[in-house]
Structure formats: C-alpha cells, structure tokens
Amino acid sequence: MSNSWLIVNGRILDPASGRDEQGDLLIIDGVFAPPGEAVPPDAGRIDATDLWVTPGLIDMHTHLREPGWEYKEDIRSGCQAAAAGGFTGVACMPNTRPVNDCAAITRFILEKARVAAARVYPIGAISQGSRGELLADFGELREAGAVAVSDDGRPVESSQLMRRALEYANDFELPVISHCEDLGLGRGAMHEGPHATRLGLRGIPAAAESVMVFRDIALAECTGLSVHIAHVSTAQSLHIIRAAKARGVRVTAETAPHYFTLTDEAVGDYDTNAKMNPPLRSADDREAVRQALADGTLDVIVTDHAPHSCLEKECEFEKAANGIIGLESSLGLSLCLVRDGLLSPLRLIELMSLAPARILHLPAGTLAPGAAADLTLINPDLPYIFSEGDIRSKSRNTPFLGRRLPGRAVLTMVDGRVSYRKNLSSTAAAPAHDA
C-alpha cells in the first residue's frame, strides 16, 4: 500500500511555522511535500473539511509498563491507545521492572516498538534502579536510544546527586525530567484539605511538590543548565516556575489534563480512579494550572498515562496504586480549553506536539516539507461520551468514563501510514486506497 496522500480542505495548524489556514497538504512516500509538487497517481485523497490537520501529537510522559508489568499494559497495547488518542509518538518513563537504567532495557523497548502503532522514545533512569544513590550511565543510555532521563515515580532526594545529574546529562544533550516530591511531606493519599479531613485520609500538602520545584530550579540556576518539571499540579509551583522563567532560568514544565479538569472533590467517597501522584488539588490550583497554560508558564500538556489493573485499584484507598490512563482522553479534555476560549487551536497543538518535540530534541512536531509525515486529523466539533469502547489500553483506571468531550482525533498517521482512523469520510484519487 502506498503511503502518499493528498489531504484537501483542512484547517492546517502548524505551530512551527505559525500556519493557521485552510488548505491542502500533500504527502509523498511518507514525507511532507513542498507546495506545487505533482500528486502521485497512486496517492489517496482525504477530504478534511471541518477537520484540523496537525503535526502528530507527542506525549512526553507515558508509562508503557513493559518490561515487567505487561498485565497492566505493554508496548503494543500502549501504542494502540496512543494512536487512538491522536498520538504519533510517546516517551515512556523508566519505572518498569527492571528499571530502564541501562542500554539493554532501552534496546529491548525499541525492538518491541519496531512494529508498534506509534513511535516510542525511551526515557532512561537518572539513578541506578531509580534508588537515588548512584547515577546511571547516561552515555550508554543515550547511545542505546534514550531521549531523556528521569526517576519519575520517585524523586531524586539528594540535592548533590541531582546537581551531578544535570551536569552529566548536559554532556550528552539529555533533558532531565524531574519528579518533584518531598517524601517527608508527601506520605499521604490525597491532597491535604477539607475533603481529606472528611474522608479521614492523610493529606499531601501543596508544599510537598513546590519545595522540590524550588530546589531543582535553584540547581538549574546555579549550574546554568536546564531542567524540566514533570506533572505540575499546584499554584505554588507555578509561581516559582513563572518567576524563574522571568529571571532567565532554563526551566520548562508540563501538566496533565486531570490537573486542569478535576479537583480533589473527584475522590468523592474513596474513588481510587481519582487517586494519583501528585494528587488532584484544590479549585484554586486547578484554575492556576489553566491560566499557566494560557500565559506560557507551562510548556507542555502530557497524559501521564499510568495503567493499572483492578488488582491495584479495587482495594482500600490508601493501599491503591497512584495513576490513571490518559492517552485516549487527553486530546478531548484538552479541547475543552479551546472551547472555553483559554487556548487558541494553534497554541493547543504547540503544547501537545511542537513543544514536547523541541524539549526532547525530536525531529517531529512540524508539517514542514521534508519532515516525516507524522500527522493527526482532529474533529474539534465531534462531541461524544467517553466510554470503555474508546479505550485501547489494557487497563480501565480512569475517572473520566461517562464524561462528554467536545472532539477527538479521527485519523493518525506515522510515516504517512494510517495507524488509526475513526468515522473519516475518505475518497480516492485514481488509483486509490482508503484511509
């Protein structure tokens, strides 16, 4: 089957060039073609009327669970979920079993991903076994194909080790992604506040995150190096990040849809599908996250896709595992920010495609001629009720089942080859192949 396509009448959104206009896009042999290029006779034709034509979405914070936790998710099923959500690439965190702290695990992940529905970008561990004691071999990880380092799921508690990680990673142009959590303050089950008190659960204060955000920004400022802050959830953290950016500190930051959509009230009466780390915060924190996406304090929207089986979720709240799935629901939830007038369509695609590509130094996030044809077609006005039928993940741990979402991805392409499609009207140029 050819991987050449003529996409017509779409709203082309390319934040790399600032392009936001109605037009056509030609793909020849899996590569975006320059304007005026002749359409190959075997090219398929897609009518993208009323659709957004965007660079493929990239999630820089995904848990694929393989190796070691394949009953929750594996690389194949996680990439199917990614493609269904409009993602052409996912960066997978290293907290597997064993931890991805060496070349052998990185190569294993890449080999398993070779025939997956989305590109996989492994993230290596900062420390050996993510124990926070000795640094992993960043050079080995980089050579094997790692695109960043992180001990996500665990903070690097030693300030000295974190400083050395920033310096060492810089030698290999590896971004450092920091899970900011003071474990001394963070040993609770949900956000510290009246809802935790009502439920009789130990609370996690906002300071458990923000004090470590302050530390890692101080280390970045001290060394003149860059740091990326993962899954920001609090107004305090955002105040620190905003001030640091104003001073010229090299800091970037991300958040996830649950932090700009839900509050700690979603825990209700011990709903473990609303248990995550960092926890859902207050209404004021949620509004601060929304505003930080609009004003540029936050650089990226990630999913923090964290699949768990019923074994880890159908138990006492304090014993339940942290995390929710997010690959299939992230775009729909993020489109709510456009619907609410908080983000422009171009800004949303920047947050979900171009920005993560730039932070991870990936050749992606653009519709420029010559770039690989990783592409997402989005219907922003296709309301639907998010249900289990929309989930390709092995796991179902999400508080968003039954929620009405304003739109969704209807087609995902990687290298010009369709990895997912849904209800897309497709016609053919002769000879042709349907999407």
Image: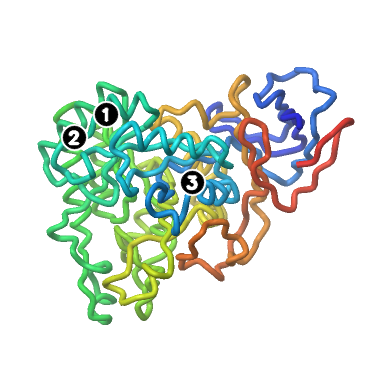
Which secondary structure, mark 1? helix
Q: Which of the two residues, 102 or 17, is positioned nearer the viewer here?
A: 102
Asked which quadrant contains residue 197, the reply is bottom left
Q: Which residue is mark 3?
A: 75
Count of numbered labels shown in the rendering: 3
Q: Distance between the Cα atoms at labels 1 and 3?
A: 23 Å
Q: Are marks 1 and 2 in contact (CB under 8 Å)?
A: yes
The residue sitting at 47% across, 56% down in the picture is 326
Q: Which residue is mark 2?
A: 135
Q: Position of residue 89 (x, y in %)?
A: 51, 39
**Relative to 246, is 201 above or below?**
below
The answer to whether residue 378 is left or right of residue 94 is right
Amino acid type at image mark 2: Leu
Q: Position of residue 60 (x, y in %)?
A: 42, 41
Which secondary structure, mark 2? loop
Q: Position of residue 345 (x, y in %)?
A: 57, 44
Q: Which residue is mark 1?
A: 138
Residue with the most extreme right position? 430
